[in-house]
Amino acid sequence: MARAATTTDAFNAVAEPRRREILDALSLGERPVNELVDLLGLAQPHVSRHLRVLREVGVVDVRDEGRQRLYRLNPQALKPIHTWVSKYEHLWEERFDLLDGVLAGLQEDTTQEGAGQ
Amino acid sequence: MARAATTTDAFNAVAEPRRREILDALSLGERPVNELVDLLGLAQPHVSRHLRVLREVGVVDVRDEGRQRLYRLNPQALKPIHTWVSKYEHLWEERFDLLDGVLAGLQEDTTQEGAGQ
DNA sequence: CCAATACATATCCATATGGATATATCATGT
DNA sequence: ACATGATATATCCATATGGATATGTATTGG
């Protein structure tokens, strides 16, 4: 088996920096393909392909407007990523608590309770 | 150019479900390779390879303990993902506010405020 | 109805993936 | 020193990627 398809899920889809750029651009509002082409400096077919991937995983939606196709973000589809990575948030925060604990232990009789953060 | 290497960054590294499983397991504490092999039900060489990828992007650290190698999570390395995806958090939250607004506008003089959902 | 605009799809290619399997390395016990 | 346990690395293979380019489709204007 090869690597999982980029269209497998949001995780795979946003692993590509260009697709993250597209999403970043769309977070400012709906845009037609050509604008994204200009913004990213990529060939149009390429942008269309990236958009296809993003559509397939549900991260963007399209809307026909005359001969343009307006892409818009569907932020909900990013939630699984947020949910997953958030599980680790307390761990990298705890790290500071641990450090604080160690420091406190080393200094044992300092009156200072704790700085901000 | 082909797809970016899995070792390019944390985004690419955690796009693989198995590697997320490994991280999930390691979030409970340091573990030797064989334990991960058992937990994941994968072949040992395969787990070692996944661990190599995770190491290269700095998501895990290793420590030699006799003939075992104990892997431990380095949660900090996941921060970029959290930072990126968090930019969108307010958008999927806002979505409900917008929807409320739209519904209110469409119904202008309906007394009904909004159904569940 | 035809040209032009705005996209989408199809094909070609180099590359690296992930699974499988075999083998190499390194530390420990005897 | 040697067998064993614990991991790492090497090789083989099918697949799908992303870039480039060419072409197909749909909508608008004259």
Image (spheres, coloured by chain):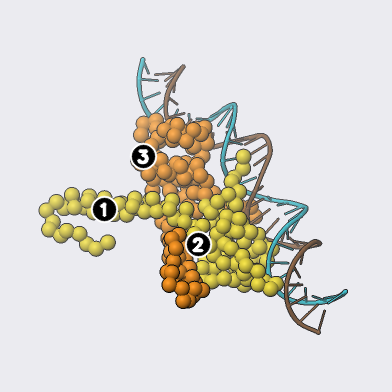
Chain colours: A yellow, B orange, C cyan, D brown
Amino acid type, label 2: Pro
The reply, left or right, for residue A3 in relation to residue A27 is right
Question: Residue at position x 35%, y 34% from top?
Answer: B65
Q: Classify mark 2: helix, strand or loop.
A: helix
Question: Residue at position x 63%, y 59% from top?
Answer: A52
Q: Which residue was labeled with disc 1?
A: A97
The reply, left or right, for residue C2 in relation to residue B12 is right
Using the image, determine if residue B52 lies above or below residue B99: above
On the image, the x and y values in percent for residue B83 come to: 42, 60
Q: Which residue was labeled with disc 2?
A: A75
* Disc 1 to disc 3, C-alpha distance: 19 Å
Amino acid type, label 1: Asp
On the image, the x and y values in percent for residue C7 come to: 68, 66
Label 2: chain?
A
Amino acid type, label 3: Glu
Q: Which residue was labeled with disc 3?
A: B30
The front one of B110 and B91 is: B110
